[in-house]
Image (cartoon, rainbow, N blue to C red):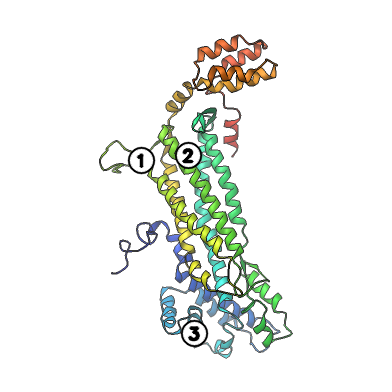
Amino acid sequence: MSVTALTALSPLDGRYHGKVDGLRDHFSEHGLIRNRVKVEIEWLKALAAEPALAEIAPFSAATVAELDAVVEGFGAADSEAVKAIEATTNHDVKAMEYWLKKRLGHNAEVMKVSEFIHFACTSEDINNTSHALMLQAGRNDVLLPALDKVIARFRELAHQLADLPMLSRTHGQPASPTTLGKEMANIAARLIRARAQIAAVSLTAKFNGAVGNYNAHLSAWPEFDWESFNRGFIESLGLTFNPYTIQIEPHDAMAELFDATARTNTILLDACRDIWMYISLGYFKQKLKEGEVGSSTMPHKVNPIDFENAEGNLGIANAVLRHFSEKLPVSRMQRDLTDSTVLRNMGVGFGHTVLALDSTLRGLSKLEADPARLAADLDECWEVLAEPVQTVMRRFAIENPYEQLKAMTRGKGITREALQDFIATLAIPQSERDRLLAMTPASYVGKAAALARSI
């Protein structure tokens, strides 16, 4: 059976392929091979540009340009050619090395120093650097921009709905009022902090040989400062150099990135569930889409499917991302191969995350607040004003204020008239009594509006 969107095993490459296209260039096997080629070529250029390595003649400007063009022009046909070689070598990095030598076989300058392609490298020098470049590009070019759009929408809702009062529910029960905008601001604030943590992860790479000691490097040039040279090479790629490793880079920075992404996903999952509840309560309505069906049998249904879809994908993403962060930093002795197959699934964790962000954004774009429903809920819960009344009573040293309001309101609610009759009896200054009498559940929102507008 040929692989199409309908026959693909993974929904990321089937039903949802269009929504995660931006990740494919970074996390596909083609993306990995292309980054390997980039690292090999940059390493060869760095060796040739170092005067202390006299046996490697410096390249002409034309050769440097050709080397750069190999990276820039690397396409699917090139990846297929590498894979054809791998069918014989049964080793993906060696196949890429052989392809590179063949690809540049016509260039006399390169062929003169062709054995310096992959010089002193273990496969993991190439792989770990490639993986770091893939993660850096996937994070900066796809993940963060998608997250930024969601944050911007939450901030927009926070500002639009800053003044719209809403009954809070702690433990699912009526509680001190807030505003709908403030609740959106809470989510935006959490995501802003989480985004900063994702962006702050410094992706590390190593380039120190088979077990991390520059054994092969020093066998060829024992007096050369390979550690400084290789540090400069890694930093020239925009990565952070890790000087202490076994054969593999220990993946601690990767784990930080996956953990930070999973924590962000958890915040988003929490938000999706809350918004689902607000829709269920009628606080939000959803804009109708012409031709869309909510139920195959109940014509009236407008289901919160975007938030449900997001919640499901966030769960899958976090299952994968947390496996990464728990498994990848663990390797037997100086190296085992269990990380290799796991790392090939980085696009899965990021794919379900990006898919969830897309679903969340679509859901948020459909939301419309229902002020009448919010007001009706508040007007049925005058008991929430027991808090400010007993708090003012405390200020003026009235005995047992909490207990008095508890006896009046706990588990049974109270009418506006009954509460105001109680306030009228209080031995407090008339100005304070008047202020309490003027208070309504809708006006008892503290700084909620100001906080919502400040995000």
Image vertical order of residue 316 relative to residue 107, above or below: above
> Which percent across, then down, holds residue 368?
42, 35
Whole-number angstrom distance, CA of label 1 to CA of label 3: 55 Å
Element carrying mark 3: helix
Quarter of the view holding residue 330:
bottom right
Question: Mark 3 is on which residue type?
Answer: Tyr
Q: In the picture provided, is 3 more to the left or to the right than 188? A: left
Q: Which residue is mark 1?
A: 303
> Which percent across, then down, holds residue 215?
67, 82
First in residue order: circle 2 vs circle 1: 2
Q: Say which residue appears at 52% left-offset and 35% top-offset.
A: 181
Closer to us: 198 or 455: 198
Quarter that holds the C terminus: top right
Query: Is there any visible trace of residue 53 in the rendered image?
Result: no
Q: Which residue is mark 2?
A: 274
Element carrying mark 1: loop
> Which percent across, then down, holds residue 166?
50, 29
* Residue 67 marker: none
Whole-number angstrom distance, CA of label 3 to CA of label 2: 55 Å
